[in-house]
Image: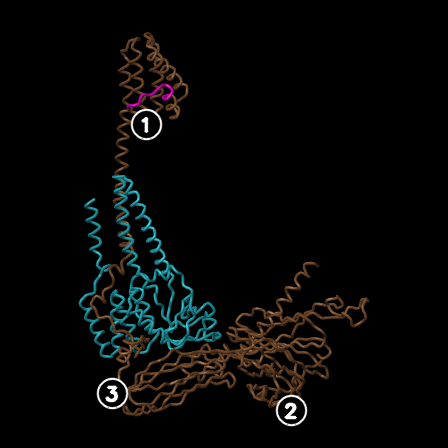
Amino acid sequence: MNKLTGHIPKITRIIPVLMGLLFLAAPALSAQISVTLEAAPNRVQVDDVFRLTVKVTGATSIDDIRIAGTDGFELGNPRTGSQTSIANGTITRSVEYSYGISPHKQGVYTLGPATVTEDGKTYTSNTVRVQVDPVEEIRGREQDSMFLTAEVLPQQAYPGQEIVCRIRFYWNAPLGNIQFEGFPDIENLEFTQIGDSRQFQKNINGKTFNVAELLHAVTPSVTGDFELPPLSVKAEVIKANRRPSRFPRGWMDDSMFGNEERIKTRVLSEPASFTVKPLPTDGQPRDFNGLLGQFSAAATLEPKQVKAGDSATLTVTLSGRGNTQLMPDLKLPPIPGVKIYPSEPQFAETRDGQGLFGKKTMQWALVPQVEGEISIPQFSVPFFNAASGQYENAATREMKLKVLPGELPAVLPAATEMQVATSAKRKVQMLGEDILKIHESPQAVSPAMGQTMPLWLVVLILGFPALPVAGAIVLRRLSKTRSDQAAARASKKAFGAFSKAIKDLEPNQAAEAFKALQEYLALRLGLEGATLTSHEAEEKLLALGVDAAAVSRLTQIFSRLETCVFSQCSQEFSQETKQDLFSALRVIDKKVKL
Amino acid sequence: MKRLLFIIIAIILAAPPSLAWAGEADHALFYAANQAYKEGRYQEAADQYRKLIAKAPVGGSVYFNLGNAYLKMDQVGLAILNYEKAKILLPRDPDLNFNLGFAIDKRLDQVEPSNGAFLSGLARHFTGMEIFWVIAVLNLLLCFFLILRLWKPAEWNFYVVMAVGLIWLTAVFFGITKWYDASQDHRAVVVADKIDVRAGPGDKDTLLFQLHDGSPITLERQEGQWSLVRFSQEKRGWTPNQGIAAIRPLRQQTGKNTEA
């Protein structure tokens, strides 16, 4: 509580500051006043109640509003809404006056303009076109409190043609959270929503229904019979809660106090079907590119009379409704005696209640070089008119450009470009269009080196360098094997040499016997020059897989000789030791394979 | 070793079809075709270029000239087809790229942009032979340094072998990409004024869409006189074979020229 009261002085300080800022900003209020008129939807039936909205932007006080063309319509009192926006330091205020309006006769009507008077000045809006259809019979549905309809218009189409799926949700019970659940994925059909949903009122057999209308463009890509499955809308039915309230009836009967109940419901439409027919092949123009819809072409030439060397601008506009993305870029064929400078085609596409509208504008600067009369050929774009079911042409008329003698000789634009370039940079313009010349060099005939080389030659060229590498590896292997074999042979001869050295030794020559044994083992184990101890010899022999008993016998003798040599004994190398040594070494010599 | 080297060089030199150069007759035909082109007899020029192509392997410039002759006769599809064939052999030729762009501008159908693979796009900037010769030279260098290292192992040649080996591996990978791209290249061009693309290989099947001269397509499959073609991800269908031509037909992939 303290915290809240602590804020109050701050807020009271801020409010005058904000007021001051608004006061200061008042001169920045947009002085531009504009008035727009909008009808939603713009296609209704007799006795439907739709919205006609006048939006006034930039006005501070409005004295009077009048809407022309509303005779024969029942016009209700307006609902008013205002909006203030600030953009780039400019405050813009707009006021909307929304009227419920109901037609009593069928036909096509032009409503507006709306005229707004402010401080004696009058401002005028655009006009809107509204089509009023006769009442469509919706039999038996007036008993339902809500229902959904889906229809495809027209029911016969061609591939690529955009048709309209109109979904209408009718209700006359209190509802909330109304949501369309969308279209299922259907192969070869593309759906695009057209605008936002529109709401109006409709009288069905004496009952007034609210109607929410949603339009979707449906584009089939193949021929055949199609059926849209039932579409669905989710909504919440609002019901007053009947439980007793502590408050008098009518007090706080809203959701905030839990005195209403919301029941979720789902409403389905009937399936809607349509047929997509193939485009007729009879009478199809040769240059027809699939353009479908209703298109027109217009051409203007300004000025129609120029001096030689001066330029005239030819503008061709192709516009219409349909698959506008297929509207071609028109090409102006060469005209003798005229230099042609094309501009980039400009394309604009908009979508309104009637569908997709496209406009492509192409411009050429024409610079005649000689006097006389020049014919500008007509442009013709074939398209298929789905409404009439026939191929038609959007064509311009042929035009004449009168060229008077120039006061100065016709100056080549290229030269002009060069003169201008010294003072200011300008984009260099293409003066003509053509391909670059042929290649004439004699080498052009010959294929590139190895262009058609057979596979075996490719393998040979890539594999050839590997041959010396393989050869070098083989040579190295052979050389190593040879040296290993020589070492092995020497090792095998070692036993003979050892026997010979030991044979005539006296018992007091233990040191010589020890040395001979060391040399033998070093040779035999491939460790030439090494001085092995008994322990090292034992380890190496066991590692080579020699019988452990034989190794043990040898190690004992080796160890004894070792001890004798290092303790300088005199009587250790007896005949019996010699025999033992020989028998142990014979076993070892057979087992060691080096 | 010297004997082996001698034998290999002899084999390479004894393979005239593989490294053939154009003869006098080919040059005469080429000059005659060029002359016809310059004098505005484009059909005659095209016939002679085609004869030259059918006769022996030729350079990409002959396809380029043939494309020019077709474009002069306003046959956009055949022009694009031959420019694309020339691009396989002369991928970075500026004249070719200019004229191909010009021909593409003249075609009627709006082509939806496709997301080509980066490596394939890069591989198309080089000819198969350019990549082959780079690999061959790197191969030679790598083997030389490997032998050197076998006989004289040293730290410097270890690093040289590693560096050359890495470049060699990259080049081989690029070569494989190029080979794969060429083997999977099923691009084709519409060479008739207009073709009908249907839901099946028969005149009675539903007409799905129509394509015009010069539109690029991808050949997916052939069944008799019909081909399954793809214009974009959403636009596929069957069309008779006579209205389309493959840029790299099977025959050309094996090293022979094709007529167009």
Question: What is the three-letter code of the residue carrying label 2?
Answer: Gly
Mark 2 secondary-structure assignment: loop
Closer to us: A144 or A492: A144
Mark 3 and mark 2 residues within 8 Å of each other at the beta carbon: no
Q: Please determine whether, in this image, residue A433 is positioned above or below residue A589.
A: below
Closer to us: A418 or B238: A418
Q: Looking at the rendering, in which quadrant would you find the N terminus of chain A?
A: bottom right
Q: CA distance from mark 1 to mark 3?
A: 106 Å
Can residue A430 be found in the magenta stretch? Answer: no
**Chain on which label 3 sits:** A
Chain-order first, disc 1 or disc 3: 3
Mark 1 secondary-structure assignment: loop
Question: What is the three-letter code of the residue carrying label 3?
Answer: Pro
Number of numbered discs overlaid on the protein picture: 3
The residue pinned by badge 3 equals A409
Task: State the image coordinates of residue B187 (x, y, percent, origin top left).
Answer: 38, 66
Q: What colour denotes chain B?
A: cyan
Classed neighbour count for the residue bearing mark 3: other residues with Cα under 10 Å, few (<14), some (14–19), many (≥20):
few
Task: State the image coordinates of residue A5 (x, y, percent, origin top left).
Answer: 69, 61
The residue pinned by badge 1 equals A594
